[in-house]
Amino acid sequence: MKIIAVGMNYASHNKEMHHSLELSEPTIFMKSDSSLLKDGKPFFIPDFSSEIHYEAEIVVKIDKLGKNIAERFAYRYYNEITVGIDFTARDIQNRLRQQGLPWEISKAFDGSAVTGAFIPLCEAGDINKIPFCLHINGAKVQKGNTAEMLFPVDKIIAYASRFFTLKIGDLIYTGTPAGVGSVKINDHLEGYVGETKLLDFYVK
């Protein structure tokens, strides 16, 4: 199982992060298998960062083996989605970016890829029109809709499959909208697709 993630896929988030790149293709990065955190288990703030940011995203689960998938056939390779959190050690990421160095350690550390409960796509609706949001301690801090993606899910799958064979159980984090911020100990995070709560965990 591998975790493929897409960066800078919402214009609103790019604006808040002061990214001005004109993207012609998805920006892909990977998370390690030990990044996965599921079943409502708590997220423990690591000791190597003082600025851990949440990033709520729609997560797609691959359910069919595929390579060099045409975009028009990409819908055949997934049938379940959830909302997840791409945790980022922002202080480390910024430092490494400024130095022109790879920043995987800021994204792929243990427990940094949180997933909620998966639901069939037929319950979530049109993959290109799915609303989602994140609440922290009862307050809505992020909201988005897959209609706002710069690169839709099927295009992401087609693009990623040029470089990586997609396997059953692989996860694709599709990008975050505006509203990212820091977490602290005892924060309670709840993620929703529409009105359905799929994600529920605490920060320790």
Image (cartoon, rainbow, N blue to C red):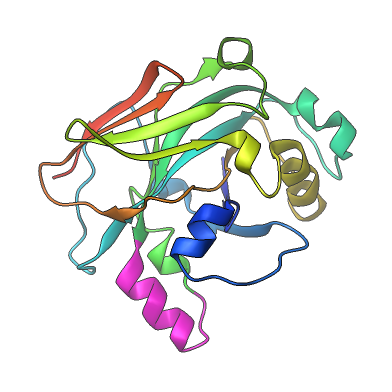
**Residue 169 seen in the figure:** no
Q: Is residue 67 in view?
A: yes
Q: Residue furthest top?
A: 123
- Check the image and report above or below for 144 versus 35: above
Query: Can you say whether 101 is above or below 13 in the image?
Result: below
The answer to which quarter of the image holds residue 197 is top left
Looking at the rendering, which quadrant does residue 124 occupy? Answer: top right
Q: In which quarter of the image is the N terminus?
A: top right
Residue 89: % across, % down: 33, 64
> Compared with residue 91, is residue 64 higher up or lower down, i.e. above or below?
above
Assign the magenta stretch its main secondary structure. Answer: helix
In front here: 3 or 72?
72
- State how many labels appear: 0
Question: What percent of the width, then of the height, locates residue 191?
Answer: 35, 30
Relative to 19, say whether 38 is above or below.
above
Residue occupying image coordinates x 27% and y 59%: 52
Tell me the residue at 45%/86% (across/down): 98
Relative side of 162 to 145, left or right:
right
Name the outermost residue toward the left.
Answer: 186
Image point 48% across, 53% down: which residue? 32
Q: Quadrant of the C terminus?
A: top left
- Is 143 inside the magenta-drawn segment? no
Q: Where is residue 38 in the image (x, y as percent from the top left)?
A: 35, 32
Q: Give the range drawn in magenta.
A: 89-102
Q: Picture coordinates of residue 76 (x, y %)?
A: 79, 23
Residue in the image at 73% along x and 50% along y: 160
Q: Does the magenta stretch include residue 101?
A: yes
Q: In the image, is 147 to the left or to the right of 76?
A: left
